[in-house]
Image: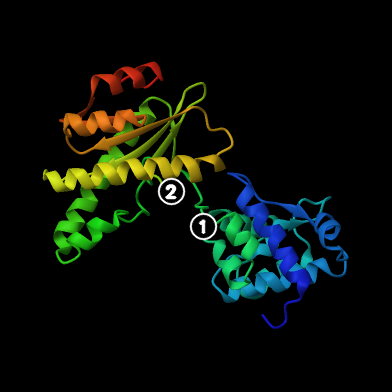
Amino acid sequence: MDMFKKYHYETAKILLDLIFSSYNCPPLITYKQIEEQTGRNCHTEVPHDIGDLSIFCLDNNMPMISVMVINANSGIPGAGFYKLWRSLYDENLSDKEIFKIEIDRVMKYDNWLKLADLLNLDLIRKKYSTYIKIKETTYDNIGNERNFDNTLDNLIYSKNQEILNHRINRHQTLVKFIAGILLDKNYKLFENPMDCLAMKKDSPSLLFEIKTLDKTTSDELRQVRAGLSQLMYYEHFNIKQVPDITELKKILLFEFAITNDHIKFLEKYDCFVLWRENNGLKGSQFSLDMLYKAGLKI
């Protein structure tokens, strides 16, 4: 980092800001646009600046961020990017094939705040401190990359890995169960950090948090409190990154039915309650009626 100058940090801020503000599309910017924001010459200086940043990224196990910077006429990076890429990877690919591979890596990488931390970019860190990349997913992939996200459960069951693993598997089975129902109704599925976000044109968006239960009172209490707080947090901090989000309905899907007092409590805070029963979905009459009006006919 001793080699970095003020313009390196300015360029990194521009590229990171673009990554965090782009959704489901390649975060691209031209050499000329960087020149306009940094004052660095787009022909003789900007290519070296972004090359330095890419080498730093590679040294820290991140994708080559310079792939984002393209020529306005060709729509792909300049020759320096491909020279660096080919020096690292022994693959006989065209420039366009290389560009697609690396821009996909940039889009799929979900820890760009790491670069902000390494470069001490406090403004970027503060601006995007709650950012977690929401990903579109499929029935086969939903839940596959997620860990059991309830810290209390990890602490409680950590000494009995078999019980913990069994509960994780039940959680993922329930995720797949609701995903199958939603796909049959032509919803698109998204995840991370939420268990499932379902979206369909001309219909409210559905935000699901999935909770397993061990049939004890204390466990139900913890799962109700955790589920409600997670849904409210996702709604406030994460959902806003999806530009075409529609009216949001928050839903807690439990492994079994919960007590009426907890159902009424959750519904008081606009959280609908469903649970799995045999091979179908059940819920309170209020929740079923409201979700029916929203277009989710169970």
Q: Is residue 32 left or right of residue 142?
A: right
Residue to which mark 1 is pinned: 110
Q: Residue at x 14, y 57 (%)?
A: 163
Image quarter where the N terminus lies is bottom right
Residue to which mark 2 is pinned: 192
Image quarter where the C terminus lies is top left
Task: State whether residue 237 appears in this view.
Answer: yes
By what rule are the colours in the image chosen? rainbow
> Could you tell me how far apart the alpha carbons at marks 2 and 1 are, in whole angstroms?
10 Å
- Quarter holding residue 290: top left
Q: Nearer the viewer, residue 159 or 235?
A: 235
Task: State whether residue 214 appears in this view.
Answer: no
Q: Residue at x 87, y 65 (%)?
A: 43
Q: Residues within 10 Å of mark 2 (few under 14, many from 20)?
A: many
Q: Secondary structure at mark 1?
A: loop
User: What residue type is disc 1 on?
Assistant: Asp
Q: Secondary structure at mark 2?
A: loop
User: Is 221 above or below relative to 283?
Assistant: below
Q: Residue at x 55, y 66 (%)?
A: 114
* Residue 75 pos. (x, y %): 77, 50
User: Is 127 above or below relative to 232?
Assistant: below
